[in-house]
Image: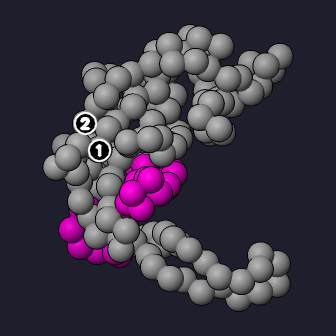
Amino acid sequence: MAKKPYPILILLVLLVTGPLYGQDFTILNEIGELDGDLSEVFGFVKDAAFTEEGRILVLDSRMLELRLFDSLGVFISSTGRSGKGPGEFTIPVAMIAVPGGAAVLDRGNSRITYFAVSESLTLEIDHEIPLQFHAWDMCIASGRVFLASDNWAAPVVEIDQSGQV
């Protein structure tokens, strides 16, 4: 049985104008509907990012999906579902845009799954990296991947392409 999304409107602010403190912001675009097609209704947006081509990636941790939208917020494709198999999620906690696609950190499956955007604009599994520890968050800086881990002695770790610290 498929999970039903919460009937709430999720606004994704793509670009805002004005200083951060004490100023009004202008919403230039938004993604999401209160009610409608499931591709437009979100359960819980965990992360969002722009691809190099200007497309928008959104990780929905309630619906267990990674969604791809065009630069105007029009739905293109999605991938993911509940499970432990390739491309499936149990507890997706973070997503980052990487050259050619996205990487999703799944705490429940202790892995990072890399998805490539195909020529037909579908999200396809590129490869997966198993982790030897649980991580809560992920970021990329200068092409290097960093994870926030449960290890108090090393709360932030850098991993290589094989998942090794």
Asked if residue 49 can be seen in this view, the reply is: yes
Residue 18 belongs to magenta span: no
Residue at the image position 43 percent from the left and 53 percent from the top: 51
The reply to whether residue 108 is visible in this rendering is no
Report the coloring of the rendering. one colour
User: Percent x, y for residue 3?
Assistant: 28, 49
Position above or below: 96 against 83: below
Residue extent of the magenta highlight: 32-60
Left or right position of 151 against 116: right
Q: Residue at x 50, y 82 (%)?
A: 28
Q: Which quadrant would residue 41 be assigned to in this image?
A: bottom left
Q: Nearer the viewer, residue 25 or 6?
A: 25
Which amino acid, by three-letter code, is at mark 2?
Glu
Q: Is residue 38 left or right of residue 43?
A: left
Q: Between residues 153 and 8, which one lies in front from this camera angle?
A: 153
Magenta-span inclusion, residue 36 = yes
Q: Secondary structure at mark 1?
A: strand
State the SS at label 2.
strand
Asked whether the beta carbons under mark 2 and mark 1 sit within 8 Å of each other, the answer is yes
Residue on which disc 1 sits: 117
Which numbered tag is attached to residue 124? 2
Dominant secondary structure of the magenta stretch? loop
| Residue 12 placement (x, y as % from top left) | 49, 69
